[in-house]
Image (spheres, rainbow, N blue to C red):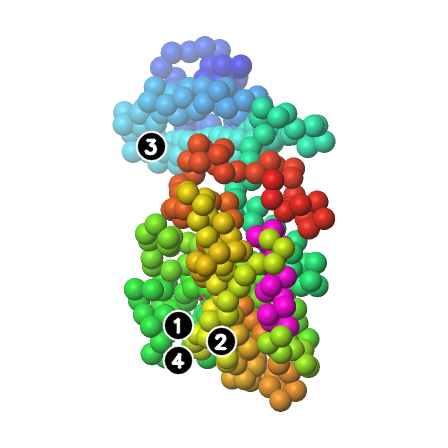
């Protein structure tokens, strides 16, 4: 590294063709200050030196040497006090220029060096994704991700495509368009996470279900539709069977002649594939949802063998989803003629379904990021579920 301090001194002297002289500093400075060519040359040479710094440590040394408490420029600034008014008038602005020029040049160089250091790190830390995974280093797939993939595989087999929507929704998509009246309890503060009011006077919400994706799908283009939408949903709720963030998969089928028989067949096919039971016992129980008419909740038969829950048979019932024929108001809200088009929708709680299938009773543990839980319930990373390859492990 160059000794810039000493160099500044020599430059000052060389600029005046003087050899080392004592007590001439003020005089020298005054002369340089009043000679624009010389003062600029000096600043330029300082900048060149800063430019030449090869790393952040060297740059920091330069900064301390020039601008630190005992740095060359700082010391020169101190001499201002002993100058006559006339000298100060000349030298003051020059020294300021010297100090600011140096500060700026150091900051600019620092940014360049930091960028270079980051790029070098990124280049050296690349991972060769074509290398085979090492079994002892492999992580595992979270049961929710696994079950989501299972659901996608099952419904893809029935011709469904995956649709998506945002987690942060407007009142219109999350409630109004779904025929949820203004006084419906789901809109209450204690159930829904609301954001502060925006410029439009509206309060965005964290979607309380995946049903708004029905609306987004129907408003994006004309029927027919056959979509599912898996995703995150949110409600102010927290106990053993509820977490504030949870997952649902929404389904929507609209066409000319879709009726409840299709709904029933689709859901039976789903239960057969998902719970891997040849003839799952199911029950369609009349229910109410504002966005469907008629509406039903679906239970799957179950029984207990000691600690083990057996699904698809027995005389107990486990609720697994809500469904119904899409309400004509919902179709109308999306500009679709209910006399021409009709269909069904359903909403499955992914976390609940996963818990039933893989025997994970406490939903809160899903999102605690406890490595022991993940190791126990997780799935092998390269084992993608498919209906022909097998859904579960
Ligand atoms: N959105 C409902 C919920 O979050 C679930 C649901 C029920 C969705 C019936 C539907 C449906 O599409 O038809 O509780």
* Disc 4 to disc 2: CB gap under 8 Å: no
Compare residues 74 and 232 and report the one nearer the observer: 232
Q: Residues within 10 Å of mark 4 (few under 14, many from 20)?
A: few
* Disc 1 to disc 2: CB gap under 8 Å: no
Residue 308 magenta: no
Disc 2 residue: CB within 8 Å of ligand 1: yes
Task: Give residue 290's position: percent from left, percent from top.
Answer: 45, 77
Residue wearing tag 1: 202
Determine whether the residue tagged by mark 1 lies in a helix, strand or loop.
loop
Which of discs 3 and 4 lies nearer the camera? The answer is: 4
Residue wearing tag 3: 88
The quarter of the picture where the C terminus appears is top right
Q: Earlier in the sequence, mark 4 or mark 1?
A: 4
Q: For the magenta stretch, what is the residue range?
A: 262-276
Q: Which mark is residue 181?
A: 4
Q: Is residue 261 visible?
A: yes
């Amino acid at each position: 590294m160059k000794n810039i301090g000493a160099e500044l001194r020599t430059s000052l002297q060389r600029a005046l063709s003087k050899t080392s002289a004592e007590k001439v500093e003020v005089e020298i400075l005054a002369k340089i200050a009043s000679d624009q060519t010389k003062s600029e040359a000096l600043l330029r040479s300082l900048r060149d030196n800063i430019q030449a710094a090869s790393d952040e440590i060297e740059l920091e040394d330069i900064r301390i040497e020039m601008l630190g408490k005992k740095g060359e420029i700082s010391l020169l600034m101190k001499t201002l006090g002993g100058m006559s008014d006339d000298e100060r008038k000349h030298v003051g602005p020059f020294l300021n220029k010297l100090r600011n020029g140096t500060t700026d040049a150091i900051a600019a160089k620092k940014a360049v060096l930091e960028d270079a250091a980051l790029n070098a790190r990124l280049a050296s830390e690349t991972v060769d994704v074509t290398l085979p995974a090492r079994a002892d280093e492999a992580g595992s797939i979270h049961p929710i991700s696994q079950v989501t993939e299972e659901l996608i595989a099952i419904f893809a087999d029935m011709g469904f495509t995956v649709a998506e929507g945002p987690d942060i929704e407007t009142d219109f998509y999350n409630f109004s368009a779904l025929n949820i009246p203004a006084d419906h309890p789901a809109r209450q503060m204690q159930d829904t996470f609301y954001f502060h009011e925006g410029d439009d006077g509206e309060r965005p919400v964290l979607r309380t279900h995946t049903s708004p994706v029905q609306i987004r799908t129907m408003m994006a283009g004309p029927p027919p539709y056959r979509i599912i939408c898996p995703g995150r949903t949110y409600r102010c709720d927290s106990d053993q069977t509820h977490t504030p963030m949870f997952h649902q998969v929404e389904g929507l089928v609209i066409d000319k002649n879709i009726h409840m028989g299709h709904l029933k067949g689709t859901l039976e096919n789903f239960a057969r594939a998902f719970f891997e039971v040849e003839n799952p016992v199911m029950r369609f129980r009349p229910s109410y949802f504002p966005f469907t008419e008629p509406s039903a909740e679906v239970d799957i038969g179950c029984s207990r063998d000691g600690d083990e829950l057996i699904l698809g048979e027995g005389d107990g019932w486990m609720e697994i989803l809500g469904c119904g024929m899409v309400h004509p108001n919902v179709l109308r809200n999306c500009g679709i003629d209910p006399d021409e088009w009709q269909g069904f929708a359903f909403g499955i709680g992914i976390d609940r379904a996963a818990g039933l299938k893989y025997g994970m009773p406490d939903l809160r543990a899903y999102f605690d990021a406890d490595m022991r839980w993940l190791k126990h319930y997780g799935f092998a990373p390269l084992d993608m579920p498919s209906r022909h390859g097998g859904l579960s492990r």
